[in-house]
Amino acid sequence: MYLSKKHKLLFIAVPRTASNSVQHALVNSEIAHETDIVRSLSPSLDFNNIRNYHMMPSVLVETGVISADELNELRAFAFVREPFERWVSSIFSKIY
Amino acid sequence: MFANHLKGGYRVYLARFTRVLDPKEDALTQMCDLVRGKSPMPFAGHMFVGKRVERPFNYEQFFYYNENKVVEAYRFEDVEAATNKVLSDTLGKTVSINLPNIQMNRNGIPEEFRQPAETWLPSDCYEKLKLYFTNDTAFYNSVKPLNE
C-alpha cells in the first residue's frame, strides 16, 4: 500500500498483480515525499505484514490510516488479473 | 489444526495465497486435489497456520468501500502503462518508466500451466474453479484494457 497525501494518490496492492513492482516504482518516482505512508513487504512475511501490505479500503479506514472522507478525495488505483492466471501464479509463487 | 477449519471456498482461497505445492510431487495432481477438496491439505507450516480466514478473497473488497467503488481498476496486462498514466497525470507531464520485476516469478510457472486453464486442467476442476471465480471473472471482464 502506498499513500501520497501530498498528491492525494493511493495505490492498493492486490495480491499477485505485480503490486511490489508498482509500489517500488511509485516510491522511487518524483512523487515520493517524506509524508508518504508506505506499507511494504518485510523479509519476515508474517501474517500481519502481508495483511498490512495488502490493505483494502475498508481496512485503511477502520485502522485510521485515512478517513472515509479522505478516501473519497483520493485518486486510488489497483490492478486486477484474470482469476485463473492469478490462481496459478499464487500456487507457483515462491513467496505466498 | 488449521486445515480442519477450512471448507469449500476457503480451500481455494488458501490456494490463491499460499505456497501449497510439494516440489517432489506432481503439480497438477496436487492442484486438482486442492480443488476437489481431498485431504490432507497439501501445504505445510505456513504463516497462515493458526489464523482463521474469515472471508474468502474477492476483487471487490479491494475496490469498494461501503458499496461505492473508490478505487480505479486497471488490468494486470496494462500494469506498466497504467502506472505511467497515473504518474503522468499526477505530475502533469509524461512519465515513462520500466517496472522492475519484483517477485513476479515469471520463470517459476512451468510452461504447461501458462496456457489457458481449460487446456490442461481436468474438466471437473476447471468447472468447479470457473464457478468459484464467477464474480472475480465478471469483475475482471468489466475492466477495459487501456487501449480500448
Image (cartoon, grey):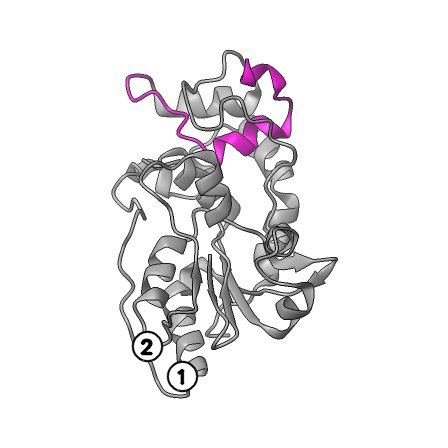
Q: Residue B90, image x and y in percent?
A: 45, 80
At label 2, which amino acid type do we have? Glu
Alpha carbon separation for disc pair 1 and 2: 8 Å
State the residue position of label 2.
Answer: A30
Is disc 2 surrounded by few (<14), some (14 to 19) or many (20+) residues within 10 Å?
Answer: few
Q: Is residue B102 magenta?
A: no
**Which residues make up the magenta segment?**
B1-25
Q: Is residue A51 above or below residue A34?
A: above
Q: Quadrant of residue B116?
A: top left
Residue ID at (63%, 30%):
B9
Q: Chain of mark 2?
A: A
Residue B11 showing in the rendered view: yes
Residue ID at (49%, 28%):
B48
Is A45 on the left-hand or right-hand side of B2?
left
Number of numbered discs overlaid on the protein picture: 2
Outermost residue, right direction?
Answer: B67
Q: Nearer the viewer, residue A23 or B132?
A: A23
Q: Residue B110, image x and y in percent?
A: 29, 36
Q: Is residue B11 magenta?
A: yes
Q: Residue B91, image x and y in percent?
A: 40, 83
Residue ID at (37%, 24%):
B21
Residue under disc 1 on the same chain as residue under disc 2: no
Is A12 on the left-hand or right-hand side of A28?
right
Q: Residue A15, image x and y in percent?
A: 46, 47
State the residue position of label 1.
Answer: B91
Is disc 1 surrounded by few (<14), some (14 to 19) or many (20+) residues within 10 Å?
Answer: few
